[in-house]
Amino acid sequence: MTTDTADSAEAVEAVGVAPAADPGFLQRYGAAIEYILIPGAALIGALATFGAFVALYGKNPLDLYFYMYQGAFGTWFSWQNTLTRAAPLILTALCTALPAQLGMVIIGGEGALLIGALTATSTALAMQWAPPLVVQIAMVVAGVIGGGLWITLSGALRQYRGVNETISSLLLVYIALAILNHLVEGVMRDPASLNKPSTREIGATNMIGTIPGTDVHWGLVFGLVCAIAAYILIYHTTFGFAARVAGGNIRAAKIVGLGVGKLIMTICFLAGACAGLAGMIEVAAVQGRTNANLAAGYGFTGILVAFLARQNPLAVIPVAILLGGISASGGLLQRRLGLPDASVLVLQGIIFVFVLASDALYGRIGFLKGKS
Amino acid sequence: MDFSRISRRHLLQGGAALALGGTIGARAAHAAETTIGFIYVGSRDDYGYNQAHAQGAAALKKLPGIKVVEEEKVPETDAVEKTMESMINLDGSTLLFPTSFGYFNPHMIKIANKYPKIRFEHCGGLWTEKDPKNAGSYFGYIDEAQFISGIVAGYSTKSGKLGFVAAKPIPQVLRNINAFTLGAKLANPKATTQVIFTGDWSMPVKEAEATNSLIDQGVDVLTCHVDGPKTMVENAARRGAFVCGYHVNQSPLAPKAYLTGAEWNWEALYPKFLKMITSGESIPNFYRGGLKEEIVKCSPYGEAVSAEARKHADEMKAKLIAGEYTIFKGPILDNKGKTVIASGVDRGQKDPELEKMDYLIEGVIGATS
């Protein structure tokens, strides 16, 4: 797990140092502490580097940290802003994190999101006679199946045709976008949507709304449930164990008789299902219909989230919140400090580099090794 | 929401200052002045749609007692809802300009319902009676300026072939292409406009390809309707073609090739809106206008524009301003030979039928689908 704020990372460091006298403690928890300490330190390093970068532009880095904190976590409003932005990222990150267990690099979550949105919208439009709950459940099923099959396509191309899944999933994004535009500007177009081609609206009663007492839509809960379920699936079931074995050494897995093809297809389906669900939620909680607005890049930010979380489904949650917070505070940085929009991308890039570079530190921190 | 209670000093004392300490001059988020928020879908310096609005915002910044906050590259998702709320809650904005078409429904409508005391002015939307009263939409009949560009282009072309790089075949874009072509035919009855649709608002690579392909086919004057005309203008100028600009004045990008252009005049409209608000006059929820109302304007003529072209264009501009000329006057055929505006029918500036335009007129080479 990574940490959200600088001070909690500090606190962790304090915990990590204090019981060093007890080697038994370190032996037991050393690895876990590493997983918190190293990304935390990488994050602090990235923030410090970004501060220096901003100082070069003549802005006060302390102002920067203050506004980042205020914009992302400083107020209740900021928290809701952060969580709203994190919600789709959890799901799209799972689209990369799950196939990564099999050693596959899938970067086409955006495509599955668009197809999920499209299938969910079509279902809702075809079921206008049904009561809202039935429509909503049907939309979830449609989004899951649509997105799931889309990524399964990449998995099948890899399994049966030897096509690299990274390339195919990326190219499928552009195909998904073309299908979406074709349908939205063609047969599915609402004739009343003159200057913004869109499908008809799914209807206000079919929208899934927000979590009571907040502004955050239910997508966050869907994301949390999926992330936890994915974690249990990967780390606490025989299916997950088989997937990790195949991911570690595919030939060994075949020799011990694991159905690798079936594993690839199932995991790809589940991965696409998560992104498809994100698309369904964008329609049912935010946009109310399908149009080109859905291609907002959640699928691509999800890749970043998955890699920062080291492909751990549970770690995806705090990382998505962190990136949600960075994007929530981006507006404040533009407005108060006059920084360009790209500064947020610069920060994301710096964090990415620091976290990837910090990978080299695992197992090399002396005091965490204990005496074995 | 208790955000106002958290001051910077508070936070620094709270230990997050990481022992750096020190006192910094506090900058209050809420001042006695009026704060106006601008939200752009692209970057403010795109030489196009967003820059036109940023120029309007810059005109407001010069006024006393006005503070402008701006945010660029805000997608048309719930992100824009959060940006609007953030501008209201954290910056104290009382007037917001969400300037992209896709911000209107559902995003701005939702936030306008939630904050009935805040005024929202949206560019391009079609406000109707069922929408919140504290929201409004404004737009300009920029096809009038495109018509003038068409006249200048018609005089300047040697091949008689004009080119149009367009984003999507939606009514606003089709109206610009048709008005441009009608202007060109006034100057040169044999002129044709070849149109290429790139499929989206900001596709620099496709825009460059479209520009090159049009010039390869003999087109020698180009214009466009995409978010950032920079790509088309620079590429066309490099290939030796003339250009008519769009959104803002692009002559600094191609001083020799620039003939004229259809520009927004937000720097005139926004201070006017503010004056209406401060004088207690209400801004009509549905606000439209063209050259006469100074919502759109034509770029100053470039050096390559002949005296004859200037004279004819100025004459037609004066007629449009005086309301003596109708651009879409029947009979008009589409490019498949079907009559789209019958003889004797005048479709004036505000005619709602023009808002539904789905055809390309005779003289345009291209298809809407």
Image (cartoon, rainbow, N blue to C red):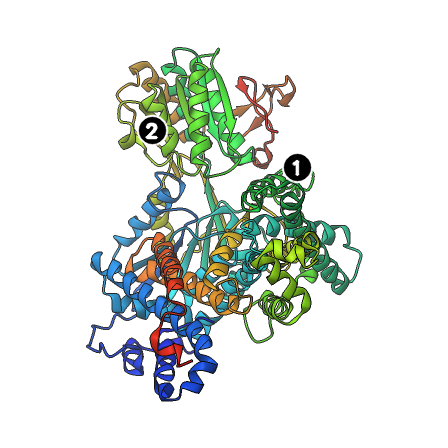
Classed neighbour count for the residue bearing mark 2: other residues with Cα under 10 Å, few (<14), some (14–19), many (≥20)? some
Q: How many marks?
A: 2
- In this view of the protein, which residue sits in the foreground, B235 or B358? B235
Going 40% across and 41% down the picture, which residue do you hit?
B49
Chain bearing mark 2:
B
Question: To which residue does mark 1 refer?
Answer: A186
Instruction: Tell me if A31 is positioned left or right of A197 in this view.
Output: left
Q: Is residue B214 visible?
A: yes
* Discs 2, 1 touching: Cβ within 8 Å: no
Q: Position of residue A246 (x, y in %)?
A: 61, 58
Residue highlighted by disc 2: B234
- Distance Cα–Cα, label 2 vs label 1: 33 Å
Residue drawn at the location 51% of the way across and 57% of the way down: A302
Q: Residues within 10 Å of mark 1 (few under 14, many from 20)?
A: some
Q: Is A371 situated left or right of A238 in this image?
A: left
Q: Are marks 2 and 1 on the same chain?
A: no
> Residue B36, how many percent across, how many down?
36, 58
Instruction: List x then y, in percent, for residue A9.
Output: 37, 76
Of the pair B65 and B241, the residue shown nearer to us: B241
Image x and y of residue A46, in percent: 33, 63
Say which amino acid is labelled 1. Answer: Gly
Question: Is any part of residue A3 visible from this angle?
Answer: no
Is A49 in front, or is B165?
A: A49
Residue A185, compared with residue B346, is above or below; it is below
Residue A292 falls in image quadrant: top right
Element under disc 2? helix
